[in-house]
Amino acid sequence: MVLTTDAMAAATSDRAWIRAMLDFEAALAGAEARAGVIPLAGAKAVRQCCARDGDFDADHLGRQGRLAGNPAVALVAALRRLLPEDLARWVHFGATSQDVVDTALMLVLRQVLDLVLDDLARAAEATARLAQRYRSTPMVARTLLQQALPTTFGRKAAGWLVALDEVTGSLRHIRHHRLAVQLGGPEGTLAALGEHGPRVVDELASELGLAAPVMSWHTDRTRVAEASGALALAAGVTGKIALDVCLLMQNEVGEAFEPVAPGRGGSSSMPHKRNPAMSAAVLAAWRRAHGLSAILLGAVAQEHERAAGAWQAEALTFSELCQAVGGAVSVTADILSGLEVDPARMAHNLALAEPRALAYGLLTSEGPTRVEVPAPGWLGPADVPGWLGPADVPGWLGPAEALVDRALAMHDKAEPHA
Amino acid sequence: MVLTTDAMAAATSDRAWIRAMLDFEAALAGAEARAGVIPLAGAKAVRQCCARDGDFDADHLGRQGRLAGNPAVALVAALRRLLPEDLARWVHFGATSQDVVDTALMLVLRQVLDLVLDDLARAAEATARLAQRYRSTPMVARTLLQQALPTTFGRKAAGWLVALDEVTGSLRHIRHHRLAVQLGGPEGTLAALGEHGPRVVDELASELGLAAPVMSWHTDRTRVAEASGALALAAGVTGKIALDVCLLMQNEVGEAFEPVAPGRGGSSSMPHKRNPAMSAAVLAAWRRAHGLSAILLGAVAQEHERAAGAWQAEALTFSELCQAVGGAVSVTADILSGLEVDPARMAHNLALAEPRALAYGLLTSEGPTRVEVPAPGWLGPADVPGWLGPADVPGWLGPAEALVDRALAMHDKAEPHA
Amino acid sequence: MVLTTDAMAAATSDRAWIRAMLDFEAALAGAEARAGVIPLAGAKAVRQCCARDGDFDADHLGRQGRLAGNPAVALVAALRRLLPEDLARWVHFGATSQDVVDTALMLVLRQVLDLVLDDLARAAEATARLAQRYRSTPMVARTLLQQALPTTFGRKAAGWLVALDEVTGSLRHIRHHRLAVQLGGPEGTLAALGEHGPRVVDELASELGLAAPVMSWHTDRTRVAEASGALALAAGVTGKIALDVCLLMQNEVGEAFEPVAPGRGGSSSMPHKRNPAMSAAVLAAWRRAHGLSAILLGAVAQEHERAAGAWQAEALTFSELCQAVGGAVSVTADILSGLEVDPARMAHNLALAEPRALAYGLLTSEGPTRVEVPAPGWLGPADVPGWLGPADVPGWLGPAEALVDRALAMHDKAEPHA
Amino acid sequence: MVLTTDAMAAATSDRAWIRAMLDFEAALAGAEARAGVIPLAGAKAVRQCCARDGDFDADHLGRQGRLAGNPAVALVAALRRLLPEDLARWVHFGATSQDVVDTALMLVLRQVLDLVLDDLARAAEATARLAQRYRSTPMVARTLLQQALPTTFGRKAAGWLVALDEVTGSLRHIRHHRLAVQLGGPEGTLAALGEHGPRVVDELASELGLAAPVMSWHTDRTRVAEASGALALAAGVTGKIALDVCLLMQNEVGEAFEPVAPGRGGSSSMPHKRNPAMSAAVLAAWRRAHGLSAILLGAVAQEHERAAGAWQAEALTFSELCQAVGGAVSVTADILSGLEVDPARMAHNLALAEPRALAYGLLTSEGPTRVEVPAPGWLGPADVPGWLGPADVPGWLGPAEALVDRALAMHDKAEPHA
């Protein structure tokens, strides 16, 4: 019952974590050999074992990790068991459990970000198409769920697009600038590597394609908190879109619809219903992403050189967060890619709104204006002298269309790797 | 890397959810047959299929549930496929997906509560033994992590005991008074069952051993929020205990230690360390329980007769919450059952604290007192004229011992099913 | 810009906290004199000073409290300054800062609960009237914001009523069984009071009208967490009601409206709008209550005999939570008391929904039924052979009406002090 | 009892919000006059009124804001009352309430960020001095609160410094790139300004010193969520530092102490205690910042063109968040500026730790190494053959010192306005 995609489930599975931890151990051995800290034969042996990830039992490691507080102790022990004693000593040399788990987290996060960024790009492209296509399609803007004044569906989509582009920018920044190896050893000074410490860190970072940090960040969790905050915010932006779609899909509104997908949105009791099941799934995932990211942010204040509890809460929560965000963004991209828009219904609903605006002089035949009005009240259609559509009002939709153009231009300018 | 117990993992597994959903469908068919709503043959056929839970593929249902927004649609479809058309119509008759999932949640919750209550009882018994055994063992009370004045370890344990008893009482109340069937049908009025609706609810409740609510509670989530709040609070109480143990285990304090368990608390780099790995696991689980319960509380405001997003966020989050709480309570029971206490170290640390208290007249040879003192400052041992232990001060430990007795008496009085 | 009522703002003001802290000090001195711990003359002098609450400068105490970590140190110092030295020593005798602040919290909480329970009663009475009045008024039930099948507005109101009654019960339980004095002295053993400790606690509790706990609960925060959880849940129930009202008030739905109140719901730019401003305020307050209660629950795991940080986060957060909940419940009572219901619009919207249900045989001329239907799809009115209203369907609304009657009967039975 | 500084209390007071809202209205009128949308005389009159902020009653506006859902309606009305009818119409021309409140939030945020960045700079400078001064001062690293292996206090301080620099960078980015005016009018298209809309936005942004956004961001709350997340993370970093200080200040550890400040850290019952009152205040503020930022992140998914509830929850929560963060960062700067370090106690505690490390061959007379060790266990001092200090081990502290130098070099390079 996990609300995520197959790809994200795989990227954050126990198996993916084991693969990432083995990648760390292999790269560490290589880096240490290149730096002259351990013998080449030792590194070669370690790396061969790390390639055999089928030999590692995820269930067993998970259970051992539960007992030991983290899975690295068991993984290191399992690796050592694969080697003769004289070579086993070069496994995990100079490192500590948290080095393995944190670097693995960064490797998993990189894969997660790539998936999320792909889906965000897909969502943004679909949204840009909607903004372009419905640039001039009048609909009523709604504030506090009440009909307000005319806008266009393109303007609404452009608002979604700007928000998608903003979170894309944040996640790209993290992807390209904030992923770093963790290597500090048990006391965070790399003492066991002596003068070779910095070179090993650089070699390790280079092999894994991660940054080499100023120093190990065992209890400086800003990288994790920034990433989880940005991921949750991306889910929040999709939550906003899904909420709008849910509201637009109401039978009484009926202006836009998520696509019909086999197996999605059905009711076990009311087959005639067309449920916003995808939007509801996004909203559910967003709720989870919000709460899960709060756990991770709350874990930032960690004791001394390794925390007792806060750090141990991270890895599982992080995986769940990624799954929630991955699901939210992917399904939102699906919704936007297949969104069905009903311009006629939009015009119909707008027509119901305009008399009220006209009656108060907010719309005149010369266009929109802003005048003093009598005390508020509620007018029915019968109170209104006539009807006047946006098409009859010069300039009314002009600003909305210009805003769409600005958002599209900004979207086109956004560099893929900014 | 799930921080829970095997029993709790099983109680909240996809398999357990499927079993609970099938129990609902079986009981529903039975109730409807007894009420004369569906034919006996139909009920019998449905119940036979529901017994074959090995026929239901958890992975497939999970994936379908992901698409449809909940797993009930796929489960109902799978059940119907097991029957000829004329009998398949009696599957899930008059019910809606949420009826299945919510009742299943209550059944899962019952099992969860039984596990948690067992572990809470185990933790409380161990704590009562500690309070009794160390009733008069002097140690220093610490406020804001600073040594304050003498107390006894029994008093500290008694404080844990009272809190454990309090959360036990809350969870027992939920276990015995707040678990209810969900049956409302698609519109919450049981319209398809007509006049037989109330009887079917009563029969269903009776067979499942749950309460029959005033009406269906599709968007009244107080039951779920109360349970998740009480579960999280239980984890919080264990978090307090684990935090105390972590602090007491510090090398510089050394007054109490979680038990040594194979595979627990080791360091991949520093085998000489004795880590508070169990306490850290409890603290990690408590952090998760806190955040997960916030997701569930936040989902309380649900739209109309079925929510779009808030409800869909519940089931997975609820399972994770139960796993976190189950792990926290079980490991805490283990810690308390095997806690190693060092009264000599307690006396040693207390001796370091008392001179300061004495110097300020808080302790006198006649016993504790409270006098006006000069401006605050910091005294080292050299500033203090002499040393006087609790054993030399008549009455000093008396109040602590009396409090232990009160807590033990209260614990003994607590009824198992209050 | 505080979203609360004047009464709740007063009940949780700095002034109210000072009054409650002075009530504690006065009652403590009295209890100690009655128990023979301090001289009667000392108690009398202390009590006279405590009556002069105008002499205490809230701003000054607040600032001092900020520096000292809590306001009690400055309050006790201010009290002592009002007395000659030989009497000043009987101020706060044997107590610690946390005793003052925690007992004050319980006194403030009692006042808060009385206000909230009054408003909950007002909300429930208004809801019961709605349920009664609209017991048989047909409307469409909506699931996932989609029109489903017929219900009555009375059934919807009855659902609100049951939830209001549930949280009322929880808060009453806390009001009558979980408010307790805090008195433990600096180490939690009441050592300075010696054998008289228990009697002083009993006398103190009796004078303040609070329970005497088994022992001091300095770092057993279950009372605070339970109260804040129950208060937040009450706000959540009002959030559900406000969300429903917001959705019903949509121009396109138009089935119910919060009352028009002067100064409420206006738009600075669109005077023709009728905003759900009260409902939005309730939803805003609920969001705050949710987050603030999470801070308090998160603070449950406190170190040793007094926490460094978690306790200090409580008092302000607690006041803000009470203000949020107070505002949410009071405004919801206003909304429900003046709710404008439009049965004609309900009938109109229901008529739009029924053809779809009929087309699938969910409604027949013999009444509601449940049959196998072809693959889901989307039918417009043109696809439907005819129209049939609930009034034409014998028994359709019967279950809804019976549920209303059950909820009303349960509400009438709820004892005011259960 | 607000945990903040006077400067931050002022920057987020009702008065500061009113000033910021008046700044918006004044700048709007000026921008519109320059763009030819309203007459110069109208703009001049509006700007004169906006200068008279003493004429606006914060209590009255607050109460009105409570009723209306936001304070802008009452402020605009109050402004209009100050002008004759023919000029009053140019107040707030073309704008909507949310334009005022959101731009005011950005102006308040700018002031908040300047205060926080000043205190972060002060904290970082003090930390850099600590890192420099104690670059080679040996102490024991602690993992899971257990003594591990030697490090230096300079390395610990360097870890704090890197984290402070990281959050400084994030907040500077927001300060210089993410603060933008809000101007969209009631429907988000600036329709009432017609073709002049973009120019008015640019002029408004220029006068207020804020960025001109692509379009109005009424329901794109990424700016607010990013700022609140970064502010909370800054508080989290101070929480980590305060937690370390609390732990180091324990009597049994005694390695570092927050400074003694008048009125701070006293106990109402135990004047001999030296409480970590400042650190506890930071930890309390961090807990609040965490929860308050979660409310703001949770409010990101807002309906259509203006939210019903989520937006209304922002302003008050935002002020409280800023106060919490401001208090946390300022007090942390005070702690770090006056931190008292006890190198002798550090050496003493380290000496207790080393025998265990030596016994397992982690330290040898040739320096640190990593060898295979027997099964874990617990050794007392008696089990250890001899004692060997870091000073005796060539290279042991070298890596720590090099890391300090790296952190200091990175800190010196950080540009003040990056």
Image (spheres, coloured by chain):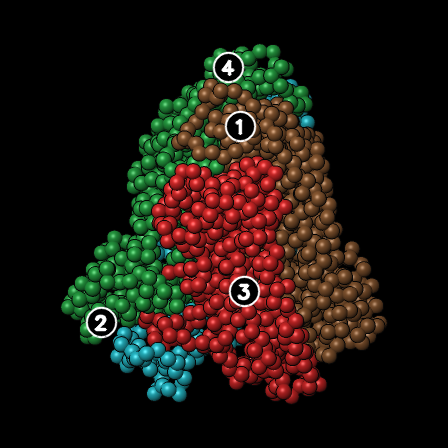
Chain colours: A green, B red, C brown, D cyan
Residue type at the position of mark 2: Ala
Residue type at the position of mark 3: Leu
User: What whole-number distance in Å separates the C-alpha atoms at marks 4 and 1?
Assistant: 42 Å
- Residue B117 tag number: 3
Residue type at the position of mark 4: Gly
- Rendered residue at 42%/76% (across/down): B260
Image vertical order of residue B355 relative to residue B95, above or below: below
Asked which secondary structure carries label 3, the reply is: helix
Marks 1/2 same chain: no
Asked if residue A132 lies left or right of residue C91, the reply is left
Q: Closer to the camera, A371 or C337?
A: C337
Image vertical order of residue B71 relative to residue B285, above or below: above
Residue corresponding to mark 4: A389
- Disc on the earlier residue, 4 or 2: 2
User: What whole-number distance in Å separates the C-alpha atoms at marks 3 and 2?
Assistant: 45 Å
User: What whole-number distance in Å separates the C-alpha atoms at marks 1 and 3?
Assistant: 49 Å
